[in-house]
Amino acid sequence: MPTPLNDSVRRQMQKMPRRNTKPELALRHELHARGLRYRLGADRLPGRPDLVLTSVKLAIFVDGCFWHLCPQHAVVPKNNRDWWIAKLQANVARDRRKDEALSLMGWTPVHVWEHDIPTPGADVVEALWRQRRLRLARPREVVGPV
Ligand SMILES: [Zn+2]
């Protein structure tokens, strides 16, 4: 990675994806307050989701605006611009590949932008969770003796 040109770029680079970031903690706090019980450390799933709601197979990612090219806040550093564009676009392409892999395993990938935390990000997760739970709760068709 090139040396950051100035402090603002350095600050962006420090937001490189890692565990327990401030937005991630804020989302976890909000989901917990709403009664959603998630798990951490789903490291064996594609893309290593930040949290998972196992019973409803939701894989949740907190996406930083800089690293995942948020349409509203993405800023490509001026220094080494081409390198950055390639790097950030590769991140996005990798996200999509991991999402496909998750879908094939029956999981639903949910990406929450850091700028959408806690709301509306938590609203989206909660709505999906409720939807899925209803689906799970639907009684199975009873097949009795003919
Ligand atoms: Zn954003």
Image: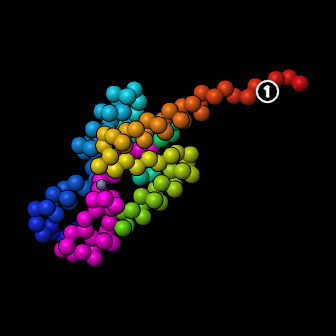
Observer-nearest residue: 113 or 41?
A: 113
Q: Is residue 44 visible?
A: no
Mark 1 residue's CB less than 8 Å from ligand 1: no
Q: Report the coloring of the rendering.
A: rainbow
- At horizontal 47% and vertical 60% (from top left) the residue drawn is 97
Can you name the residue that lies furthest to the right here?
Answer: 146
Q: Quadrant of ligand 1?
A: bottom left
Query: Where residue 85 sits in the image (x, y, percent)?
Result: 30, 71
The quadrant the C terminus occupies is top right
Q: Which residues are magenta?
A: 59-88
- At horizontal 16% and vertical 63% (from top left) the residue drawn is 9
Q: Assess whether residue 80 is covered by the magenta stretch.
A: yes
Query: Where residue 42 sits in the image (x, y, percent)?
Result: 41, 42
Query: Where residue 63 sits in the image (x, y, percent)?
Result: 33, 52
Judging by the rendered image, the residue that carries numbered circle 1 is 143
Query: Where residue 74 sits in the image (x, y, percent)?
Result: 28, 62
Dot 1 surroundings within 10 Å: few (below 14), some, or many (20 or more)?
A: few
The image quadrant that residue 15 belongs to is: bottom left
* In the image: residue 5, left or right of residue 115: left
Can you name the residue that lies furthest to the top here?
Answer: 145
* In the image: residue 116, left or right of residue 37: left
- Amino acid type at circle 1 is Val
Observer-nearest residue: 47 or 22?
A: 22
SS of the residue under disc 1:
loop
Q: In this rendering, is residue 74 above or below 52?
A: below
Q: In this rendering, is residue 131 above or below 1?
A: above
Q: Is residue 35 visible?
A: yes
The quadrant the N terminus occupies is bottom left
Q: In this rendering, is residue 48 above or below 5?
A: above
Observer-nearest residue: 14 or 136?
A: 136
